[in-house]
Amino acid sequence: MPSVGITSIGAYIPYYYMDRKTIAESWGGKGLKGSRSVASVDEDSVTMSVEAALECFRYKGRNEIDGVYFASTTAPYAEKSHATLISTVCDLRKDIFTADFNSSMRSATSALKAGYSEVLSGNSNEVLVTSADIRNAYPKSLQEQVFGDGAAAVTVGNKDVLATIDYVFSCQNEIHDMWRNQDDLYVRNAEARFAADEGYNQSVLYAFHKIVEKAELSVTDIKKVILTTPGMKENVKIAKKLGLREDQVQDTFTSTIGVLGVAQPLLMLVDALEQAEPGDKLVLVAYGNGADAFVLTVTDNIKKIKDANSLKKYLDNRAVFTDYGRFLSFRGIIEAVPGEDYKIPASTAQSWREQETYLKLYGGKCTECGTHMFPANRVCVQCGTVDQFEKVNKTEVFTKLFTYSIDNLAGRSDDPVIVQAITEDADKTRYYLNMTDFNKDQIAIDMDLEFTFRKIHNLGDFVNYYWKVRPIRRKRA
Amino acid sequence: MKDSVAIIGMGCSKFGERWDCGISDLMLESVSEAYKDAGVGPQDIEAVFYGNGFAHGVAATAVADTLKLDGVPIFRNENYCTSGHIALIEAILAVASGKYKVVMALGAEKLKDTGYPGLGVGRGTSTVMEARRTAPGSFALIGTRYFHEYGLSYEEGRSTIGKIAVKNHKNGMLSPRAHFHKEITLDDVLNAPMIASPLGLFDCCGNSDGSACAIITTAEIAKSFRDDPIYVKGFGSAMDGYSPLYKPNFSWTSFGALVNSSKSAYEMAGIKNPREEIDIAEVHDCFSVTEMLIYEDFGFSERGKAREDIENGFFELDGGLPVNTDGGLKCFGHPVGASGIRMTYEIYKQLQHKVDNPNRQVKNATRGLSHTFGGPPQISALLILGNEKG
């Protein structure tokens, strides 16, 4: 049997975070310790999933990917594939299998398990699993402080495996402990001790014991146990019951990022792998009306991701968000005064026709004179030849700011400042894009920028996505 | 073609927030004045060239419906802010061709029914690529780059262009039909709310309703209408071959459209040194920074030296080359399709020495230039007029 396992990793944490006390103080309360991540107004589960997926291509070529699984409970469409959208944005092959996993808190581990089986069966060699969530909790609830927004992705394959998946185990447990009805904006909860006793605790304990037994592991053999948590530290209580030492319990990042929903298990796995040494045994247990459990063994290949820095680079480069009102408006909880939108309605046909520009960020290179243009142009601006160009994917390219303006009135009323940016890459390609995730005081000509996939608006009653530029976060300049 | 076509009558409506007027009322205001000024009536008009940016799907029928010009061709031109100027150029070409003897160029725009204070958000034909582009945000791109290129600090740059706003407001005070009448200081400009850095509120022109009209005929018969017709010395229009937003190597401190259109007009008018040979100019000051750029691209100032001329008052009403004597777009207002003809109206009256307020009359003006610039920006059009042949 080939060894199948994790072959690449990626994570994404939004630029903004809120101190929990900021939220609590808006209601006259004191607040929990720490902070939570906050997706910006131009982000959703799709854009964050793309960010995490792009990170995976550090270690896996795009052409190697045979399948894309997207997992989220907060995907923008109730009907329409998100995995195809993400696959297109990532510029993956046409002949691949795409699937959406939703509704369950175990969506990401379900997708991981499906990907594992897919590779094990020999149908595919490499599957990308990308997960994200941006869950809403009732305003003033504790969960509003506890939840966070973010994404994590892995690829599962049979070549250059970082950690083999050796054993899998799943169980199911029907219970209404946390749920959200079809039209609900907020997550609902059963009485806390009931939910913990009969939901999380029961399933996690059962799954852990079963998989350890299956793998014939003793607790002391395990380097890290990756236990997801529905709250700030339910995992720690369980870990004690399991007899685990503190250093065996993988960090949940709830104190700095929050509870990430579907993205939590893969985000924790990404960090655990980055801290791991060859030979380490990892156990992952993810909860959601039952549990999915995995035993992994870290291989020598882990050395090549030593400086991956997947989470730290984002955590070290964030900005505090202090406006609770804007937080509510960004998430569609309250409606700020309407701003002005572009007058032309979005066309499904145009968006489809232009997807190499809108979604893939393709430029063109003239095969006659070598001039680069964005978007790809049929007539070369330099030599005038027609249809003599090759398409170039520009998403990984860095650009420098050539000129800009900071417009205080052009955006939505809850996010009015728009930075128009003219940028230039090393091939002298010029781009006109808006800037996002910026510090207004640090914008300067010649600053380095990278591309980020974002939500522009919902004209035409569908989500219109496009790229923006931002100061470097995903990669170091 | 120089001196073969003449303007024999013009009219201009009051500009501003004309809540009481529809586009027909605005047209009637300028057309009535132009008929009277030229001593003609609707029966004399053989064709109309209509400059208008926002027809809302009714093409040029608003002109026919208003003026009751039965059976007369009405050509509508829409070219961003240069719509009025290009309508004028089309009218001039039509007369020069020999097809028509007497034609009308008419510009009209009713912006204030659309419920927004500026020209709004979103440009271009793609719903996502320019979804948040605004006019101030785009023209501010020029300012940021210009300041960088010529080593001006943000404060130096802002105060340089701010002086243009102060000048135009001062001129606007002397202009009864202008949208705004408010004298401002440089401090007012610098302390005003920021719209799109480096452009503050007073760096931006007004968004107005208005209309302007010209009656055009051959130079040969012009004097049978009036003693002081104004002759067309030259015109030019140019569009850059690709949007500056995406064009490789584009400098953002100079626009080919400005350089090429002015060169073409100067050649036609036989002008070698515009700084010396032009007595008065109305140029496209949609934003203060645009006027500064035009000084250089039109050869009024040497490259990189506009600042010195601004500091020395060269473009003031009593300077070497007075620019935007009626307050410019800045104060007179900017009803897109009407602006080019309104600016030409000011030159026409100045060259006849008949401006409506003698305090802004430029003494001994014999040759003047009017100009508009539009798009992301990408297109420029101008006209050079004189009060004598030769």
Image: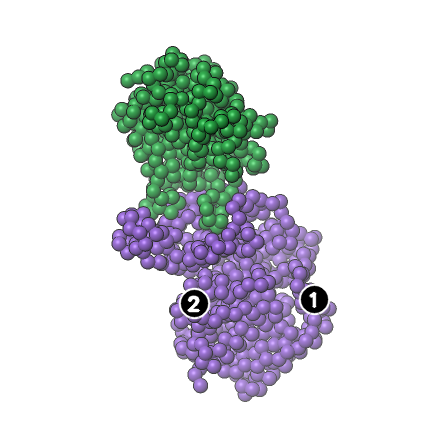
Chain colours: A purple, B green
Q: Which type of secondary structure does the marked residue at label 2 adopt?
A: loop
Q: Earlier in the sequence, mark 1 or mark 2?
A: 2
Q: CA distance from mark 1 to mark 2?
A: 41 Å
Residue A54 figure quarter: bottom left
- Say which amino acid is labelled 1: Asn
At x 58% / y 56%, what residue is drawn? A18
Residue beneath disc 1: A189
Residue type (three-letter) at the residue carrying disc 2: Lys
Q: Which mark is residue A342?
A: none
Would you place residue A32 above or below residue A402 in this image?
A: below
Provide residue B299's location: percent of width, then percent of height.
Answer: 31, 29
Q: Residue furthest top?
A: B227
Query: Circle 2: is it few (<14), some (14-19), or many (20+) Cα within 10 Å?
Result: few
Is disc 1 surrounded by few (<14), some (14 to 19) or many (20+) residues within 10 Å?
few
The reply, left or right, for residue A128 in relation to residue A413 is left
Which percent across, then down, holds residue A412? 56, 46
- Left/right placement of residue A287 relative to residue B188 reads right
Number of marks in the image?
2
Q: Nearer the viewer, residue B217 or B80?
A: B217
Left or right relative to B251: residue A349: right
Q: Which of these two is toward me, A70 or A271? A: A70
Residue linked to disc 2: A94
Image coords of residue A40 (percent x, y): 54, 54
Q: Is residue A262 above or below residue B146?
A: below
Tell me where residue A82 appears, x and y as whole percent. 52, 64
Q: Residue at x 59, y 72 (%)?
A: A106
